Image (cartoon, rainbow, N blue to C red):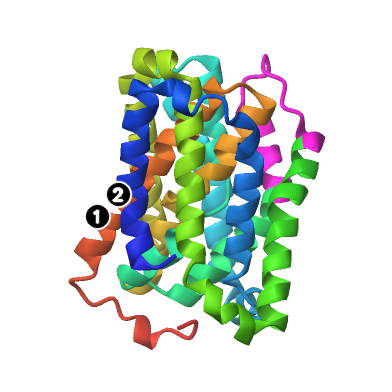
Amino acid sequence: MNSRSVLFLPIGAILVTIVAIIYPALLADYGKAIVPMLGLVMFAMGMTLKPADFKRVFDEPSLIIIGVSLQYFLMPLIAWALSHVLGLPLLLAAGLILVGACPGGTASNVICFLAGGNVALSISLTAVSTLLAVLLTPLMTLVYVDQSIDVPMVKMMLNLVLIVILPVLAGVLINSRYQKRVERIKSFLPMVSVLSIIFIIGVILAKNQPQLIDVGILLFIAVTLHNILGLMMGYSVTKLLGYDESICRTMSIEVGMQNSGLGVVLANQYFTALAALPGALFSIWHNISGSFLAVVWSRTKSGTENHPLK
């Protein structure tokens, strides 16, 4: 995503939220379009990647291990703890945990660039965490979600292959083989992704308009704390390990910004539309917080130029 698309996403998400609350009938019947829309987003993401982005992880594998560990083990744990502390209903807790178990968000790479982070590391982490999502997203959801809720791990894994891995790999393949030809359309892909995510948010919120009004404040507190704690822990852990500012910023953004669109789709398919609400709200909030961080951090040097993964 480019910077213009990143700024448009939270604005568009807020506008579609207003529409979904006031006129839910406009969007509530388009649930069947959610999965294809997410597939389109993942394909567009793949079109921004190259095989070199996956090979780059071998330059400094310790950073990838740290990032993936924080992403998949810390974020679901934080979601589980917040659900218990705040007393979230079971389905909302399941949705929040599922968001925590998702890979890095599609906007994180641009936020990282704007914030003076290490873009190469950000891209590598997003690529690796997305591939690992097939196994780790269902597994972490199974571990933390209340056992009274059925988590169809095998079905979820197969679905992740279809709506995440295959579209991403198809995008990578096309980008690698026809790089000059696809260069013409790359500038349009970020906005296609943004509009798709906004549409998904609108449909989920419209389908849950009555429940959203009932649990809105409590759920917003849970989602906000989940994101802020992820941003803080991503930064703090790498800082304690002695990494430079650019790496700390990158880890903060990668850990705190989830692929909440994926969480929305999986929750809607395997739990209920209500369980998809945390992901929809997370999509709005994490782009706002990420954009704010980018503005603050862009005003100070980060030392990116000194790092081998630059």
Residue 282 to residue 61: above or below: above
Residue 58 to residue 43: above or below: below
Q: Residues within 10 Å of mark 1 (few under 14, many from 20)?
A: some
Magenta span contains residue 82: no
Residue 273 visible? The answer is yes
Could you say which is closer to the camera, residue 246 or residue 239?
A: 246
Residue at the spot 72% in from the left edge and 27% down from the top edge: 151
Taking the view exactly as shown, the residue that stands out farthest to the front is 26
Q: Identify the residue position indicated by label 2 in the image.
A: 289
Q: Which residues are magenta?
A: 134-155
Q: CA distance from mark 2 to mark 1?
A: 5 Å
* Percent position of residue 22, x then y: 33, 22
* Percent position of residue 50, x then y: 64, 77
**Mark 2 near mark 1, Cβ–Cβ under 8 Å?**
yes
Residue 175 image-quadrant placement: bottom right
Q: Residues within 10 Å of mark 2 (few under 14, many from 20)?
A: some
Q: Amino acid at mark 1?
A: Phe
Residue at the spot 42% in from the left edge and 84% down from the top edge: 307
What element does badge 1 sit on?
A: helix
* Percent position of residue 267, x then y: 61, 30
Q: Amino acid at mark 2?
A: Ser
Location of the N terminus by quadrant is bottom left
* Percent position of residue 246, x then y: 35, 73
Q: Identify the residue position indicated by label 1 in the image.
A: 292
